[in-house]
Image (cartoon, helix red, strand yellow):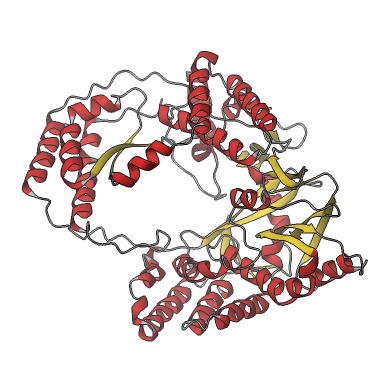
């Protein structure tokens, strides 16, 4: 299957679309050739990075990428003359170099390239991802709009409005930032993200993913707020509240951390595995109760900015406007979906009820209680003296304001996140959980990805399987399945075998020597020469030779322990070229003729 066809019966799908989408939305068509001037222009940000590394080499201050605001007008001081000389020589070589631009060899034939351009310009079929990343799907645009409107017409959750008060929201955020700096001058640097590019922000917009694994098919609502006025404020609030959320007893970062913890848990004969799930969590959490929960956590650690943080959260939640096509909406209840602080706020909301009610009353029966957002895993120890203790536990959960719960009892094994958890003798074991509806459309062998990306993709998947699978036979079976899946994507067995062999050898051999060397020799600081990837262009070694980057890199490594790495920028994949989250967007074609 190339995609999930959700269109009404009788819908005409263009010939060749199945083949095109069967390449996967991550498939990168051959891009236009990279011109010689691009290689020269890319040297300037590289040189700036080198100067910045040298200028701040003795500065050990850490920073958060979440709230970092770059200053493009800042001019770092020159590097030492001998390094500046090498950089000047590289720039001269770039001006003189003649990068041979050969006739492109396309990985899509002319018919497919024509179809791709036509699909970008049409407004009848909607191509979108599915929830849980189960592969691409297609709907008609009329069907997709009805699908979204059916969700938005929940009168108690959303309200249609005539206008979005953007200027008022921006003014309110500016006032908030000024008040914050007056109250806490030490936040001036970290809080700059709140007003960064505030004047150029616009309304958030709504889109949705179909939940094809649900019957009937559900809707995963998403509000893209990356360019909205409240996005910077939401990032700062995430930065402030994030460390608190990780201290909650039920907190689990990801399936890897859960696997490490549960693999140390001994099996008891009467253990029962349960999983719990919240129905429509984000739109169901009451705002006032959520703010009360945050206040409780902040008060517990006597945070000096409690009132400031609560005011910021109220701004994000109260001014939650967005567009869908030509219509404008306001979310009336629940958390602002898509805003960075929403997962943290949901974690704190549920964490408050866990730590004040659930854990104190049921701790003796909870051998393990772990939650990832709205999913909970419980290893339950029955209380022989109280047969109704589990019913009491469920009743306490149901008392969480606004939320509805579903739970499932598991006799043999429980599925949680992407793990299957089972009894393995005296301990609990895990194996990788793979959904039946997942199409596993890995990029085909001829996708315009850099070779290192394909190599890294195989190693990354095998590393994940190695970590997740307790039993060797489960890991070996997944290795064979993965090999076959790549064969079905057009890879040759002769090409795959060395990649799999090298990856498995790395995973089976402890890297003690590298660790010992790292303890003696400091790890080099990296700077990146970022250029678009051109499968028909010069190789890495040719680029290094033509630009004399090896000479520059050698002197930097010897004198400053700085390493230059060529970093390829991936071409736009089919997903970026075909999927339009804005229903009224009209993106220009970027497909080679």
Nearest to the observer: residue 466 or residue 533? 466
- Please identify the quadrant where the N terminus is shown: top right
Q: Quadrant of residue 291?
A: bottom right
- Left or right of 158 in this view: 52: left
**Name of the residue lying farthest toward the top:** 494
- Left or right of 535 in this view: 203: right
Nearest to the observer: residue 578 or residue 499? 499
Residue 31, image x and y in percent?
A: 39, 29
- Left or right of 217 in this view: 73: left
Residue 68, image x and y in percent?
A: 36, 62
From the viewer's perspective, is residue 481 above or below residue 364? above
Task: Identify the residue shown where x is 48% and y is 63%.
Answer: 228
Task: Identify the residue shown where x is 10% and y is 35%.
Answer: 92
Task: Identify the residue shown where x is 56% and y is 19%.
Answer: 490
Task: Identify the residue shown where x is 54% and y is 45%.
Answer: 580
Residue 405, image x and y in percent?
A: 79, 62
- Can residue 535 be spotted in the picture? yes
Nearest to the observer: residue 200 or residue 249? 249
Q: Quadrant of residue 188?
A: bottom left
């Amino acid at each position: 299957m190339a995609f999930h066809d959700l269109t009404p019966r009788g819908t005409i799908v263009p010939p060749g679309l199945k083949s095109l989408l069967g390449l996967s939305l991550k498939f990168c068509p051959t891009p236009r050739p990279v011109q010689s001037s691009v290689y020269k222009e890319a040297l300037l940000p590289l040189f700036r990075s080198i100067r910045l590394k040298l200028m701040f080499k003795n500065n050990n201050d850490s920073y958060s990428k979440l709230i970092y605001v770059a200053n493009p007008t800042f001019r770092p001081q020159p590097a030492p003359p001998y390094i500046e000389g090498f950089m000047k020589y590289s720039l001269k070589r770039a001006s003189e170099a003649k990068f041979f631009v050969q006739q492109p060899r396309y990985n899509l034939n002319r018919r497919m390239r024509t179809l791709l351009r036509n699909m970008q310009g049409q407004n009848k079929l909607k191509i979108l991802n599915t929830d849980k990343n189960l592969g691409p799907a297609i709907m008609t645009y009329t069907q997709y709009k009805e699908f979204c409107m059916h969700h938005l017409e929940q009168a108690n959750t959303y309200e249609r409005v005539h206008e979005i008060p953007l200027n008022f929201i921006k003014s309110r955020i500016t006032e908030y930032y000024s008040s914050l700096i007056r109250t806490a001058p030490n936040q001036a640097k970290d809080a700059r993200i709140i007003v960064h590019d505030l004047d150029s922000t616009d309304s958030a917009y709504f889109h949705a993913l179909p939940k094809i694994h649900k019957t009937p098919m559900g809707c995963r609502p998403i509000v893209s707020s990356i360019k909205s006025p409240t996005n910077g404020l939401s990032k700062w609030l995430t930065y402030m509240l994030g460390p608190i959320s990780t201290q909650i007893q039920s907190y689990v970062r990801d399936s890897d951390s859960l696997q490490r913890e549960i693999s140390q848990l001994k099996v008891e004969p009467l253990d029962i595995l349960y999983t719990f799930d919240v129905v429509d969590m984000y739109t169901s959490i009451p705002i006032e109760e959520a703010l009360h929960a945050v206040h409780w956590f902040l008060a517990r650690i006597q945070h000096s900015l409690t009132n400031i943080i609560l005011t910021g959260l109220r701004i994000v939640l109260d001014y939650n406007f967005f567009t869908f096509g030509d219509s404008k909406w306001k979310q009336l209840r629940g958390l602002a979906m898509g805003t960075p602080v929403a997962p943290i706020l949901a974690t704190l909301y549920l964490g408050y009820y866990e730590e004040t009610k659930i854990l104190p009353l049921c701790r003796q029966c909870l051998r393990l209680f772990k939650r990832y957002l709205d999913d909970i895993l419980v290893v339950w120890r029955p209380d022989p003296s109280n047969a109704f203790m589990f019913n009491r536990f469920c009743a306490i959960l149901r008392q969480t304001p606004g939320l509805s719960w579903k739970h499932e009892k598991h006799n043999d094994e429980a599925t949680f996140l992407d793990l299957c958890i089972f009894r393995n003798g005296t301990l609990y074991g895990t194996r990788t959980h793979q959904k039946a509806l997942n199409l596993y459309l890995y990029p085909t062998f001829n996708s315009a990805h850099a070779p290192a990306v394909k190599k890294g993709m195989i190693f990354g998947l095998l590393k994940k399987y190695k970590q997740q699978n307790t039993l060797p036979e489960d890991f070996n079976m997944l290795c064979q399945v993965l090999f076959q899946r790549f064969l079905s994507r057009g890879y040759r067995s002769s090409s795959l075998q060395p990649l799999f062999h090298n990856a498995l050898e790395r995973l089976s051999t402890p890297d003690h020597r590298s660790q010992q060397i790292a303890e003696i020799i400091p790890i080099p600081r990296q700077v990146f020469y970022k250029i678009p990837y051109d499968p028909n262009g010069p190789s890495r070694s040719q680029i290094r030779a033509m630009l004399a980057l090896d000479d520059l890199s050698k002197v930097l490594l010897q004198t400053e322990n700085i390493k230059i790495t060529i970093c390829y920028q991936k071409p736009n994949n089919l997903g970026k070229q075909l999927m339009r989250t804005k229903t009224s967007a009209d993106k220009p074609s970027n497909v080679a003729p």
